[in-house]
Image (spheres, rainbow, N blue to C red):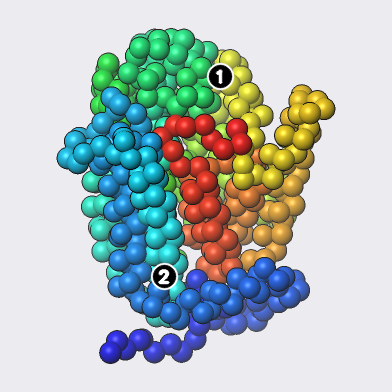
Amino acid sequence: MEVRPKVTKVSTDPAEPPGSAGLADRAGTRDPLERHGPPGPIERVMSTVIRRLSWSRLSDPKIAIALSGVGLLLGMLVGAMAPNTETLPHPIVLPLSHLLPSLQNYPVLASVMLYTGDVLACLGLAGMLWAHSQGWRPDPRRLLLASAGIVAVMVSLTPVGSSDTASYAAYGRIAALGGNPYIKSPERYLGLSSPYTTAVGAIWKKTPSVYGPVATVIQKFAASIGGANASTTIWILMILNGIVFIGVGLLLLKTSDDPIRATLFWTANPVLIQQLVSGGHLDTFVAAAAICSIQVARRVSGMWGDVLIGVLIGLACGVKINAVLIGVGLAWPLLRRHEWMRTARIALVALATVAFEYSFYGLSALKPLFAASKLVTLPSPWWFVHEIGDVFSKGATATLIGILWPIAMIVVAGLIYRRISSDQPREVVAPFALTFAWIVVAPWVFAWYTAIAWVALTQVPRNRMTRWLTIVTVLLALWHSSGGQIAPGQ
């Protein structure tokens, strides 16, 4: 019979470590949910379910790790059996995808394997967090090493769940050939017969790049190595992405107040590994710059610290523009403390960095970005507004949504901000609140977009948002999972 570790004190949230509750107790503060009123019916049901499951067999570390492993294995098998409906199409096949027969003729099987893997990864993550809340203290270095081994295999498998890596490769190929990926689309510049264009998702073949100049540099570098071979270019992109993912894990291990929790949330997080590494998404780079800027803000003071923060935020925006949320999140507590000079210094350096990056392509690089900002997809509630409004006035509806959703994001961010105990560092609470609110409210969002919220959450010691971020991430993963098919609701 298995003997569970003796527990002396359990956190207010079974998904959080036991010691975190004591921090608030010693500081003389109450649970933020109590301070701001009793939880609603959904929160009460969620808490009841979590408390029951958190003391079930799922919280056994061996079972939790096994579930995580099986979930990741299923996703890797889908990548190893490329091409199929959940991977990039032929002729994109990475080195380890030659080992098993293709699932091309079994589309249902490929989807069932990937969706089952996502659910098991979610249960495995929850189980590991519950085990941690009951006293399980794994060695984060071993978790990092195990994750590095999985990542090393995964980057050599055909990307799963999205065609974004094909778009990255195509834009890189355009740049490597001397073209401007912000003006020329893959179809227009490379031609329909190019293996690069063939791999790009159906609705993106005619779309110029919506990524920043730093992303274009990364893509161009990979394409310079890959040349005419699209598979090699995508493989290089996958390797770079895997290196950055593990690099962020190493940074969290060295700089986090609670390295075990940070490792469980990032490096050993099977949901994130499946979405970021297996999908090969640039959001890993955004998250890397984001956590660097947050850690600098927490540890480095003075003018040069502010300059470094501004540069890091500018670099992150040079990958994907949504990184501006980190800058706003870091400015939030500064403005509340009336630190006007610091705020202005960080903002000016960040703007100067972004301006320098875009100077190589001019204002034309922003045009595809503005066009993409009008996209709406399910499960965003804005999709219903979009569809109803199209009956009357398509242009007016897009404008209305563009005005309302940022306002809604600020409101939701404020609610999240207040739900996290006031004794926690605002330099991490505010960026998390804003990025998570963006995930919930934005008209166009995917599971891999949550990377920026997850990396911020690794530094927030005590809160009940973990459960919600996990559920939202898995829901988006199940909703949008394909090898480049048209997203539902697009």
Left or right of 227: which side holds 51? right
Q: Position of residue 367 (x, y in %)?
A: 61, 19
Residue beneath the point at 64% across and 66% down: 420
Residue beneath the point at 73% across and 34% down: 386
Q: CA distance from mark 1 to mark 2?
A: 44 Å
Residue 417 falls in which quadrant of the image? bottom right
Disc sitting over residue 165 in the figure: none
Instruction: Looking at this view, name the residue that lies furthest to the right.
Output: 392
Q: Quadrant of the C terminus?
A: top right
Q: Position of residue 301 (x, y in %)?
A: 54, 52
Q: Position of residue 406 (x, y in %)?
A: 72, 41
Residue wearing tag 2: 127
Residue beneath the point at 51% across and 24% down: 203
Left or right of 288: which side holds 30? right
Q: Does residue 296 sit above or below 36 in this rendering?
A: above
SS for callout 1: helix
Q: Is residue 70 visible?
A: yes
